[in-house]
Amino acid sequence: MSGEILASSSAVDMTVGQFQPQQERGQRAVFCGLTSIIWMHRKIQDAFFLVVGSRTCAHLIQSAAGVMIFAEPRFGTAILGDRDLAGMADCNEELDRVVAQVLDRRPELKTIFLVGSCPSEVIKLDLDNAAQRLSKEYSGGVRFVSFSGSGIETTFTQGEDSCLSALVPSLPQRDSDQPQLLVVGTLPDIVEDQFRRLFVQIGIDCVEFFPGRSSTDLPAVGMNTQILLAQPYLGETLRALQGRGAHYIPAPFPVGVEGTAAWFHAAGAAFGITKERVEASLEAPKARAIKALSSYRDELAGRRFAMLPDSQLEIPLARFLSRECAMTPVEIGTPYFDAAVMEAEIPLLPANVSWVEGQDLDPALSRIRAAKPDLTVCGLGIANPLEAEGLRTKWSIELLFSPIQGFEQAADLAELFARPLRREAKLEVGAWS
Amino acid sequence: MELTLWTYEGPPHVGAIRIAASMRDVHLVLHAPQGDTYADLLFTMIERDGKRPPVTYTTFQARDLGASTAEKFLGTLQSAYEHHKPKLILVADSCTAELIQDQPGTLAQTAGLPIPVVPLEMAAYSRKENWGASETFYHLVRALLGSQQGVSSTPIPREAGALPTVNLLGPTKLGFRCRDDVREIVRLLESAGIGVNVVAPLGAGIDDLMRIPEADANICLHPEIAMTTCGWLERTFKQKTVKTVPLGYGATRDFLAELSEVLAYPIDIDGLSECHLPWYSRSVDSTYLTGKRVYVYGDGSHVVAAARVAQREMGFDVVGLGTYSREMAREVRGVAKELGVEALISDNHLAVEHAISELRPELVLGTQMERHIAKRLGVGCAVISTPAHVQDYPARYSPQMGFEGANVLFDTWVHPLIMGLEEHLLHMFRDDFEFNDNAVPSHLAHGDGTLKEVEHPEEGGSAEANLRWDPGAERELKKIPFFVRGKARRNTEQYALDHGLSAIDIETLYEAKAHYSR
């Protein structure tokens, strides 16, 4: 590990048991799990995500997606009406009709996800059963899988967790004695390709990604499967895979140079590959990344930042910003803290930070106003109002939509945080600070 | 269940948020699950609002359903009151809360808050955003003015020499160009010597709403939002409603005429009608606009107004129109009948897409959604109605209403079409070696794709695929300027299909040309 990178470390070597964020329960300004459909449908291109819900669900997805990027999306909503709720219409028959409509327009689909929503869950619509029934009806042609993306069950990125864990039972059984590495969590194709090349260089040939690029490309899983999480919000999926006999490799997440290097090292160690060989393979991309990152580090060093709860990426991102960009965290909120997946991150976290799990929006905003950080990472609904009050912000959804993982993206990630500050320095109009 | 890929309107509670966000002193407490806070970003990102809409959401989750969501609601109500100190609280359910039947309106009214609490019923499973906005505005006004009923149920006689006054009702946040339309209409009224008593809900406080009965009449600027309220005010306070929406040159003159009649006050309409649209439309370079095929779709009031402007002020041919506002279906059907075209009353964007691709217009006047449809079909498009995207909330002054609004309409709708003189030049220079099919008019040089030829539109169907183009006919087709070539190809193929031909030669091409030029 580069000494330069670790220079700003003030970690107190907390263990995961000692890490106790402050719990808050109040108004939460977060998306529901349906929002995950926006990046998942781009990754799994032969699938359709059919939300069974209300007009609010349809409106949420198109609003969060930045309003209508594609003329005809691979997601849609079966909007429940008064007739469905009053029991005047048979919901199964209605669903069959809507599914037929979807397949009529897109006969090439291989999988249809039936996505549960707040209203479908409150009226206890059994989408699991519906998925099984429809899978039989379209036997062989189209697979139906149900999962919940509702706001009462899932927060934002947990929609992906819910989707992937619903797919785990249909992964083929793997009986091979050969060890296999399974990287879990949606990654942009370009990042997936970079990672695959590096794993091969390290000497891990048998590597698969879940989810893959098509819904039929399902990795087999078994006793010799080792899991590396590419995203931090996949606790349920991890537990489901462990239930299939797979082993988890605890590691920091591949965010920043340090996180990415540690992630590859953890995989190498689990596969019995020497540290030297792993280091040799990582050397060139790591050196490139450190060099690219250094100019952003100069811009970001010493700046104070806060994060409002959003995606569960907050802990790895706060670690990256404090250790590799020399920024000072003030308050870091996360919607949900899953100790099982954060084990390797916690010892790297800086001291004297106020950690919050959950949210109570109005008091949290009051604390931010009082602390006046140089940069606040927050959702789209809050960014402009904070800017108007004189605070610089980075909207957080971009962290899910842009490739940020891995060595080649480490500088791009830092750039996302540096851009608002650079903009402030440039502009001579307006009332900022 | 209804399959929806894109929705034109949000759910009704988003309409309630629009009313609260438009006003001062008002706070909305919304009983809603986690995730419904996405609505904030419509205001802060699409309209670039510098403050969060005044809404507190209960954001209940599964664990709360097991315990008590009603208690959570009361706690949220109390903390919202203490934190935001509004003068009035609106209370509503979102779609999920409606199902768990906590009756937050009743709970809130008995919570002992020292300010008025107005409960709303949002009917999430049968109604939509504009209806929700309309209901919210109506219940708010009724709650505040209901007690004055009878006190001033006769119009207060105007003092001799005093200026007549009106209220402007209906403009909201996330409406289409409301900010600029209000400024334009206020300016117009002032130059006509008419005072503006209250503008609501946009920018109004509770005190302003209390003063509504003081005006001589109400101008219903956005019928989707304000017609119900105007009707109630008319019944309760005998305030007349001016119903003509001043959108377009003729409609603005009609609006002034109606206003003059309602107020029994003379208005010098000709003296106020300073507008470039009439002359620009008569200028010879506009000749090429004649008979351009236009499709119009949007909310009811914008469609009614745009159809009139397109047909009678720009000289286009409106070949079809439609609306997602079921509340305005009668008016839109009326306009369609006058024009001799079909009205599409549907909020299904696939049906709208189908209508547009069937009618093959040369210009689409629509919403953000039709912009995508038009782009796919290679047709020009101008946005005339919500739902709109961030670029339709421009920094510059850009009203749609009033005489300046008519100027803006002329510019905005002509822009996607080829300028008249340039059309000429394209004909003259099309054989020039430096001038190729990919050249686009200079004002569109940045490749927004609006004029690309669509050689084989998807919806062409398999029948057209069976047609064989003779190489000679294909070469002849290439000699036709690229911007009309797609239309020529489609017309020829349609002609061939209609006449049972399986091959197209030069003769067919010219037969078809003669057929369609009748």
Image: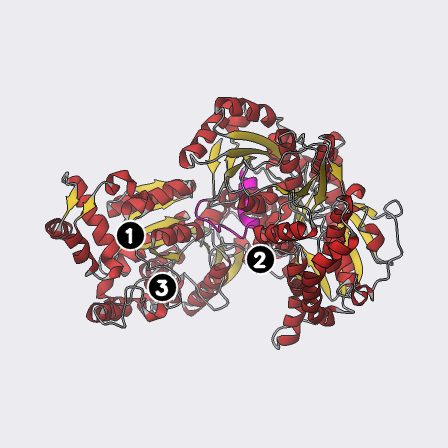
Q: Chain of mark 3?
A: B
Amino acid type, callout 2: Met
Q: In this rendering, which labeled residue sits more in front, label 3 or label 2?
A: 2
Q: How far apart in space, not on screen, are marks 3 and 2 (Cα)? A: 28 Å
Q: In this rendering, which labeled residue sits more in front, label 1 or label 3?
A: 1
The local secondary structure at tag 3 comes to helix
**What residue does disc 2 label?**
B45
In the rendered image, the vertical position of residue B182 relative to residue A156, given as above or below: below
**What residue does disc 1 label?**
B455
Left or right of B42, for residue B290: left
Residue extent of the magenta highlight: A55-72
Identify which residue is drawn at 64% across, 37% down. Answer: A164
Rendering coords of residue A37 (x, y %): 57, 43
Closer-to-camera residue (A393/B329): A393
Rendering coords of residue A92 (x, y %): 52, 23
Q: How far apart in space, not on screen, are marks 2 and 1 (Cα)? A: 37 Å
Q: Is residue A39 magenta?
A: no
Q: Earlier in the sequence, mark 3 or mark 2?
A: 2
Asked if residue A335 shows in the view, the reply is yes
- Other residues around mark 2 within 10 Å, as few (<14) / some (14–19) / many (≥20): many
Rendering coords of residue B511 (x, y %): 11, 50
Tell me the tag on residue B406: 3
Q: Are marks 2 and 1 on the same chain?
A: yes
